[in-house]
Amino acid sequence: MNIKRRDFLKVVAGSSLLLASGDVAFARTAKKLPPSAVGILYDATVCIGCKACQNACKQYNEMPAEHTAPEQIWDDPVDLSGKTLNIIKAYKNGTGATKDAEINGYSFVKRHCMHCIDPSCVSACPVTALDKKSDNGVVTYNKNACIGCRYCQIACPYNIPRFEWDDPFPQIRKCQLCDHRYKEGKFSACCEFCPTGASIFGKVIDLLAEAKKRLTLKPGDYYHYPVAHVTSRETSYRPVSIYLNHVYGEKEGGGTQYLLLSGVPFAKLGLPVLSEDSAANRSETLQHTLYYGLIAPITFLGGLMYAVYRNTRKEHEDKGDKL
Amino acid sequence: MTAEQKPIGGKIVTKTFLICLFFVVIAGILLVKRFIYGIGAVSNMSDGYPWGIWIAYDVVVGTAFACGGYAVAMLVYVFNKGEYHPLVRPALLASVFGYTLAGVSIFFDIGRYWQAYNLIVPKYSQLNSVMFEVALCVSTYIIVLWIEFMPSFFDWLNKPQLLRTLHKVLFAFIAFGVLLPTMHQSSLGLLVYIAGEKISPLWQTPFLPLLFLITAITMGYSVVIFESVTSSLAFKRDMEIPLLAKLSGFIPPMLGVYLAVRFWDLVGRNSLGLAFTGTLQGNLFLIENILYLIPTIALLSPIKRTNPRWLFISAVSMLLAGGIYRFNTFLVGFDPGPGWHYFPSFSELMITFGMIAIEIMGYTILVKKLPVLPDIKHA
């Protein structure tokens, strides 16, 4: 019996060693930006809070109005929800006199899916209902695959996926960057209908270059802010505000295809402070370390089969035919 | 029928049975409401707290409470400790119920339950998902548990031929019955790892799988002790004290390893200070770990191990510690950001109570009818 047990322990020790040493060997590398990735650049200093984007989003994604006021007349969502994929929120401090100032100021912020380069929701989804397109990087949702487990909601650091809690046949709802409009030669409705150029659509590399350029501008100088699309010739010519020297989404959680500029710290606008490594990468690295090629579980199972077979056979001989 | 286990007999419809039935009926009515009006009609879950007690208790804590079958099978069949054999069937029975009801709970928790089979549709299966692994391992293990429990049925039906056939292949199922919980009990911890910064540093760590696995095993042994003591009291039977005393001896060294890893990790990540901030998270962390210390210290003493009262106190502390640890990891330590709050609704709680009631009803019916509990009076 002791020998058998020692054999078994060897198997266990072997598998644990495999697990312990695997950290580097099986590390999954962080995902890179797809070659023709598209996204949005939102500049809070240019946003006037008119919510034209919110309205356009509802219209072009066929989303219902949401009523929070007693009148039940207006579409007046207070947060993202199963009915609202895009929302303008406001930050206010003290007197709220100065736009884009943290103290005694105010700012708007536009919230919707960040279209992460290495999305946690995609890594978490057990049935590929959430998926990232390999060409343009849009994070899409397929209701025919979804089982409604809501693990995507647990995983998303931005709390973007929303669930239809009051529907017996619920879906997860989130911004899909108006992916359905590209084949008509159009792009995200929120950008197309933004009158000031606060939200602009385009290739992520172009958007990042534009964002970095804006950070070099001198406050008070005038600048041609492109409207709707980063390559648009239609611009809004206006003075430059004081920017925070940070492009949110360039590095957060491994980077996102939705980039933001602001004068107010992003944490105050409700955007989380995240490490540069994506949680999907950390989780999958740990999981692959334990389960790489199923080597450890299969080895462990082999050891178990052997031990149980030997031990139950001995028992049959000793005490007759019973378990 | 073997001499080792005997049905204990007695009336099925007792006062306890009727109280349980009451809870089951209430839960049934509320579940009808859930399937007609949606999950929001009965629960307080929200987009910030998308998982409530149905996941944290029914699945995560519930399956850990149901680890008795796993922990005892490992001892008897892998480490060849035949003396614990009388504990196998009662432990398996509790596991069968715990896991089956966790499986049932998942069906009313998931929104699009009619598409659950997508998990095994090749074009949809997502192998990088921790949820995929947990779902597959748990559902396979439920089937394995029923097969492992079959000998009790065959004994009852008096079918020695079936029993002999089953015994030829049972070793393979027993091996799977150890592998699968090892995988999914550790992966239940890994589930929340991807929530990253949303989980407090008091619980967020790459050691989650190891910590969940160790506590699942010690909770398994504690459940066996707890059930043995309570069923001796409830059914007025003698206790298997010498066996339980030996079994409880495994708990302190395992918890020693657990606590060493837990605190070494917290100190290493400079996060232990959060325990003493007086917040709900800090206080529950302290309660969780004090509860771990009780069985670790008490069961070190061979005298206390043979004392039914200390055995019971230690087992209950261990089960509470493991349960609170899981609640803390999934709910208390989970902070989706300012403004989000969660406390289960009355209906949500009643549905969970209904599940617990079904478990108690099923366990008592089967120990009365099937040869499950060891026949100690004549042993």
Image (cartoon, grey):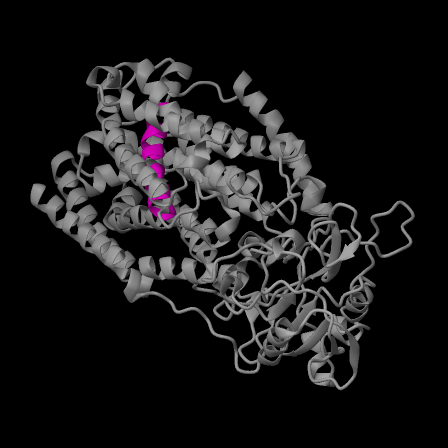
Judged left or right of residue A299, residue A54 is right
Taking the image as drawn, is residue A294 in sight?
no
Q: Quadrant of the N terminus of chain B?
A: top left
* Residue B349 in the image, given as x and y percentages of width and height: 61, 32
* Residue A137 in the image, given as x and y percentages of width and height: 57, 75
Q: Is residue B218 magenta?
A: yes
Taking the image as drawn, is residue A170 in sight?
yes
Judged left or right of residue A193, residue A252 is left
> Which residue is nearer to you in this view: B162 or A154?
A154
Question: Which residue is at the far left?
Answer: A3
> Which residue is nearer to you in this view: A73 or B160?
A73
* Residue B183 in the image, given as x and y percentages of width and height: 35, 51
Q: Is residue A141 magenta?
A: no
Q: Quadrant of the C terminus of chain B?
A: top left
Magenta: predominant secondary structure element?
helix
> Which residue is nearer to you in this view: B164 or B365?
B365
| Residue drawn at the location 70% of the way across and 53% of the way down | A164
Q: How many marks?
A: 0
Determine whether A129 is above or below A226 in the image: above
Quarter-wise, where is residue B153 in the image? top left
Provide the residue span drawn in magenta. Answer: B208-226
| Residue drawn at the location 44% of the way across and 33% of the way down | B275
| Residue drawn at the location 48% of the way across and 52% of the way down | B196
* Residue B280 in the image, given as x and y percentages of width and height: 53, 31
| Residue drawn at the location 77% of the way across and 67% of the way down | A57
Determine whether A288 is above or below A166 in the image: below
Judged left or right of residue B43, residue B332 is left
Quarter-wise, where is residue B250 in the image? top left
